[in-house]
Image (cartoon, grey):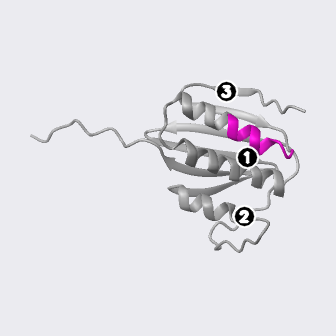
Amino acid sequence: MTVTAPSLTSSATCLVVALPGGPRSPAAARRIAAGWRKAAACPQTADAVLIVSELVTNAVSHTRGPCLLTLAERGGSLDIAVSDNSEDMPDVHRPAEGGPRGGFGLEIMRHLGDSLRVVPRIGGKTIHVALRVRAPAPDRRRSP
């Protein structure tokens, strides 16, 4: 069986993909993110792909139904976001208490990303991880 995830919106700086809520979605999300970041010649592709994998894995493991992956590059930072249909909020401030079967996803995202935030909405939530992917452009204004 092949997971197809049609792109809803795609450009050089933004990609939005709907993913089914199944066990193959994390792998599909990794392939999609790696391809998109490689096309942009991003030096942080491995970190971005790992964050995407953790976010989609959490959405598939802890919620029912599809999720929405959004990658948006702005000003040298990549916003990696996954929306799902669960109103249960993860405790992003609690240290990881994982075990042999996992439980370290949020800790990995906190370590790799520059920030992690949860945005609740009616009928679900979106988890965002910001990742610096390029140095900010130098300020070319000179003081007199």
- Label 1: few (<14), some or many (≥20) within 10 Å? many
Q: Amino acid at mark 1?
A: Ser
What is the magenta range? Answer: 22-31
- Secondary structure of the residue carrying tag 1 is strand
The mark that comes first in sequence, 2 or 3, is: 3
Residue 5 image position (x, y, % from top left): 78, 31
Query: Which residue lies most toward the right here?
Result: 1
User: Looking at the image, can residue 122 be seen?
Assistant: no
- Secondary structure of the residue carrying tag 3 is strand
| Residue position marked by numbered label 2 in the rendering | 90
- Secondary structure of the residue carrying tag 2 is loop
At 81% from the left edge and 29% from the top edge, which residue is drawn? 4
Answer above or below: position of 30 versus 86: above
The mark that comes first in sequence, 3 or 1, is: 3
- Label 2: few (<14), some or many (≥20) within 10 Å? few
Indicate yes or no whether the magenta region holds residue 74: no
| Residue position marked by numbered label 3 in the rendering | 9
Q: Which label is found at residue 83?
A: 1
- The Cα–Cα distance between marks 3 and 1, rounded to whole angstroms, is 15 Å
